[in-house]
Image (cartoon, grey):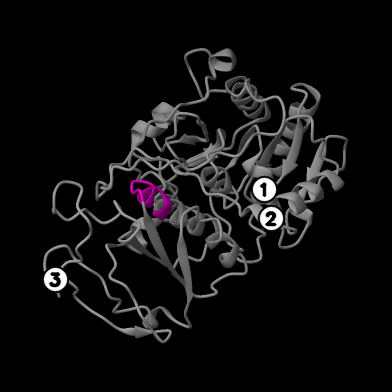
Amino acid sequence: MTPPQVSGLRGGEPAPPGASPERPFRITLPLVAASFADQLFAVKTAAAIASNFSHSEAHLLSQAIMPYTADILELYPFPGIIRWFESPRDWYPIRFYDGVGGVQQQQQSDGENWPEQDFILPPMMASQVTLRGPEDCPLVLPEAWHDDLDAQLQRLGLDPNHWFCCLHYREPTYTHKQVSNIRDVNPDNYLAVRDHVISELGGQVIRLGHPEMAPWPDREGFVDLSRLPASWRLQFRAMSQARFFIGSGSGATGIAVAFNIPSAHTDIGDFYTGRAEDILLTYEVVSPDGRRLMQQDLFDSGLFSVFDLQSNIRAGAPYRIRRNNIEELTTAARQIHARTADISGWRTPAEPKITGRNSFLWPPQSKIRPNFVDLSALYGAQEGTP
């Protein structure tokens, strides 16, 4: 088959896919990840690519992998079609146009002929959060959800006229992933962060998470969404309007990434975005030779990887990890609070922007520009040495 001919921009020259509504850029996302954050990252990556095109159409392919999968797919901000399958084996071969040899493969699926696809997002790259082009496209909640979710937040005690932040941390108790690893933290330290934000910074705090998390005592200014089963829609809406997020590397952190919320990523060992609006507070690693590595030193050491560090520890290497203490965590809270001083009430959710360049770079550039929490007031030049 010959490539589709679309009305040209100059004379009779064919326009590229995406330049015309008659021939949108077509992207396919096979969603194979199961984890909460990986699914959010995959949908966000597909949206970031599509935001380069004046007109686009997505084919979002998935099984009903997890109970939250359907709602995550609904966050895709551009035109798209969600297709459900019993197994990934039913997805391939899908019909796509390779730009050189025309349509390569074709299948009958769901009783329909699929239009040619311009790009199939490789599943192994879809959830690589640092792989971004110049766009950082936020996901968007369907408008039909807004009023009911906002009303629920207010019924739970959230003041609609005052700012709030979202908070989360990892515990090894999550029903869908009961695995302990070096990302687990001390809940009591984060309880102190909650109290610091309310009492010292004058904000409200929403805890995100799941009902298996350790219970916290109630107090004015605190809304605990983790106690509500299957409350991810409510957690999406809350995060999209939060002044900032503070928390450790875990699934709910992906919600902050999805909605472009300025974040203080704490007790962190590789779970980060590299966004200019974010700040990082790493845990401290004590190496076998006695070096204490934290912040930039840890980043430069080659140990800024949960998987690599955990593998070394399991193999018997005598690395030790010190979690962030309360003073470090509250320092991070004060700094992300100062960086978001323009927000005094509920944030207006970010809107996606379409660049209209009708092209994109692949493979994308990895943008790693970490901004570390300044600990000099605690430790002087020797960050990470309590």
In primary-sequence order, the first of circles 1 and 2 is: 2
In primary-sequence order, the first of circles 2 and 3 is: 3
Out of 297 and 64, give the one closest to the viewer.
64
Residue on which disc 1 sits: 237
Q: Secondary structure at mark 1?
A: helix
- Give the residues in magenta: 46-54
Q: Which mark is residue 2?
A: 3
Q: At 19% across and 73% down in the image, what residue appears?
A: 103
Q: Which mark is residue 327?
A: none
* Residue 6, position as x, y percentages in the image: 22, 59
Answer yes or no: do the residues labelled 1 and 2 have beta carbons within 8 Å? yes
Q: At 66% across and 66% down in the image, what residue appears?
A: 175
At label 2, the amino acid type is: Trp
Q: CA distance from mark 3 to mark 1?
A: 45 Å
| Residue 349 in which image quadrant | top right
Residue on which disc 2 sits: 145
The local crowd at label 3, few if under 14, some if 14 to 19, many if 20 or more residues have their Cα within 10 Å, is few
- Residue 88 drawn in magenta: no
